Structure formats: structure tokens, C-alpha cells
Amino acid sequence: MIKIIFILFLYISLTARENPFFNTNEANMPITSNQKIVLDPLKRVSLSLPSTAREIESITVKYKNLDGSISTKELKLNNTVDWHIPLFISQAYAPLKERATTLKKAVRKDTQFKKLYTLAFISFYQSNTTLKVVAKAAMIRNFLLVHPHRIVFDMKQDLSVRSYIKKLRKNKIFTKIRIGNHKGYYRVVVELDGYYAYTLHKNKNSYIFNLH
């Protein structure tokens, strides 16, 4: 009898939740979201100092990284300052509508792109922070990797060629292009000079990577 009661108690304990090995406390569960918050670009902001200020030691900027982490950067100054005159922080910028118009024009006009590297089966062109890839093959997938920061994409074409490496020594954004052959596709790796995200636009037989 005691054995039957113990088995019944064990069964109730295990079936009381769908999975007894996971925490059901929603307050402790991580929350993820794909919502993208669009912020206005920085124009110019001012900061007024109190009348007691006579010297400015440093300026610290707190900023958010691509991965959402928060960092700070400090600039040492050690200068005298007139508290009557406000301090200004500004950044050269183009309005969002203007940037969108520029991108559309770049997609339509080849003359705005400078040739980076060309092979028989694929060509690369640049317009500022925009990369244009022209190829007859279709793109299978694309993604971003770090260390070093690079765009990776696969093209659906089987090539019987060796691997290619092209160093773009004078380029300030796209620093190296690597191409390797795989079964059923070839992989392209475009290394970047820093951390970026990108949006991808397809236009006929070309692909436009817009870094931001």
C-alpha cells in the first residue's frame, strides 16, 4: 500500500507541469524583441555651464553599441572655458529622406559606383558605404560575422576555380575580399574596417549592401 501511494505521489509531481525541469516563473525568463526603434540623427545640442565653471577637464560620451551594450569614451581637454558661452555637440548629417533618395539613385546609376574587384563570374563596386555585387548566380544566404567584422554571402554556382584573396589596401571601409569554392555554391567574404550593420536590396542581377 505504501509503495502504491509513493508511485501515485511521484506521478502527480511530475505531471503537474508540462516539463518539471524548466523554471515556469515568467518573471525570471528572458524577453527578446525584434522591434527596431528608429531615432532621429544627431544635429546639434548645447550645454550651459554654471557661473562657477572656469576650466573644462574632459568630456565623456555615453553611447550604445550594435549589440545593445553601453560604453563610454572620454576626451581629455584641460582648457579654460567661458561659462557665458554654451558648449555645443554636433555632427555632420544628411536627413533620412535625403539618404534614402541617394541610395535609390546609387542603385539605379552605375556611374556613382567605383569598381573594386572583378572576376569572370562576379564584380564588386563601391559608393561610399554602399557595396554593389553583380553576379549571374542567385544569392542563397547572407550574414554578418565579427573578429574581423565581415559580410558573408553564398552564391548558388559550382565553380572549378581556386580561392581568391584581394586586399584593398587603400580602401577605408571594404578592406579585403575572399572567395572560396564549395560543393554547389561559392562563398564570398568582404572584410570591413569596423563594426557595421547592413540592409540588403536586390536589383535585377545585382545586390546592394548598405552599411549603417
Image (tube, rainbow, N blue to C red):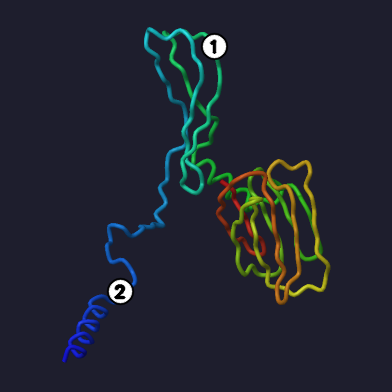
Please report contact status of discs 2 and 1: CB closer than 8 Å, yes or no.
no
191 horizontally vs 119: left or right: left
Instruction: Give the amino acid at mark 2.
Output: Pro
* Horizontal and vertical percent position of residue 39: 42, 41
At mark 1, the secondary structure is strand
Residue denoted by label 2: 20
Label 2 vs 1, first from the N-terminus: 2
Task: Place residue 161 in its image quadrant.
Answer: bottom right
Residue denoted by label 1: 79
Q: Nearer the viewer, mark 2 or mark 1?
A: 2
Task: Place residue 83 in its image quadrant.
Answer: top left
Instruction: Give the amino acid at mark 1.
Output: Asn
At mark 2, the secondary structure is loop
| Alpha carbon distance from label 2 to label 1 | 63 Å
* Horizontal and vertical percent position of residue 196: 58, 47
- 125 is higher (above) or lower (below) than 10: above
Q: Residues within 10 Å of mark 2 (few under 14, many from 20)?
A: few
* Horizontal and vertical percent position of residue 55: 48, 10
State which quarter of the image contains the N terminus: bottom left
42 horizontally vs 161: left or right: left
* Horizontal and vertical percent position of residue 54: 45, 7
- 23 is higher (above) or lower (below) than 84: below
> Who's the residue at 62% across and 55% down the image?
208
